[in-house]
Amino acid sequence: MKSQLRKAQLRVDKQLDIFGVEKDIKEIYEEDKKTNKDHVATPRWVVEDIYNLIGIENFKNIWFPFNNYDSHFKLRADELNLKYKATHIFDDLGNDFFTTIPPKDCELLISNPPFSQQNEIIKRTFELVDQGLVKSFCLLLPLSTLETPTRAEMWEKYADKLSILIFKKRIQFLGCTTGFNKACCWICYNIDSLKEKLIWI
Ligand SMILES: C[S@@+](CC[C@H](N)C(=O)[O-])C[C@H]1O[C@@H](n2cnc3c(N)ncnc32)[C@H](O)[C@@H]1O
């Protein structure tokens, strides 16, 4: 994974010819989709469901930090005319979540992040919250995100504003064999429309 990211970064660095670079990065992205076990695309019904549950139209300056060309988070946002910024490690700027600054006055970060990096992603997300750069978030994560002392400590610290939406059925992620499908949940922080702490969906 590291070498793939490095490869992408090198290509990003070559962006003198904009058209050539865009093609390069799209090629890498397509390749990555096939080989990277972290590239797990979210089906449309999951996106529509969470958008309805949180009332996405009420949020301004939304950030999709792991989304690119064909992501339903972005495609549905376009249909709803939402104001958003969609970034991805394989976009034309090589926007790494860990160093990218959210859009100004970001009211919502929402995405399906790479599960293998979840600890670092949760940590970074709360740093952005603490810095006032992100007001609320919804992260689609495996249900096992609730275990391990490291993650439990992070969630516990912010528990007052957390709601957990648990999927009753396993999600069939796009392009994945059924072997991948894990029990999942949305971990939502500071979302006004979610009145309960635990919700089964
Ligand atoms: C689980 S997939 C989700 C794809 C899309 N968001 C969706 O739900 O359909 C996570 C994506 O994040 C990308 N990614 C991995 N590390 C990243 C990073 N540090 N910054 C931004 N994107 C990253 C992966 O290449 C992968 O395509």
Image (tube, helix red, strand yellow):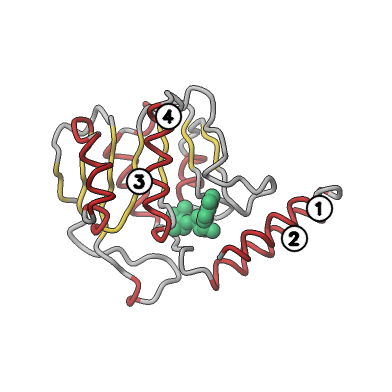
What residue do we see at 38% from left, 27% from top? 130
Please say if the residues under marks 1 and 2 sit with CB atoms less than 8 Å apart: yes
Please say if the residues under marks 4 and 1 sit with CB atoms less than 8 Å apart: no
According to the image, label 2 marks what residue? 24
Query: Distance of mark 4 from mark 3, alpha carbons?
Result: 13 Å
Residue type, mark 3 in image? Leu
Q: Is mark 3 within 8 Å of ligand 1?
A: no
Please say if the residues under marks 3 and 2 sit with CB atoms less than 8 Å apart: no
Counting residues from the start of the chain, the first of labels 4 and 3 encountered is 4
- Which mark lies nearer to you, 1 or 3? 1
According to the image, label 3 marks what residue? 139
Neighbours of disc 3 within 10 Å: few (<14), some (14-19), many (20+): many
- Which mark lies nearer to you, 1 or 2? 1
Query: Distance of mark 4 from mark 1, alpha carbons?
Result: 31 Å
- Which mark lies nearer to you, 4 or 2? 4
According to the image, label 1 marks what residue? 14
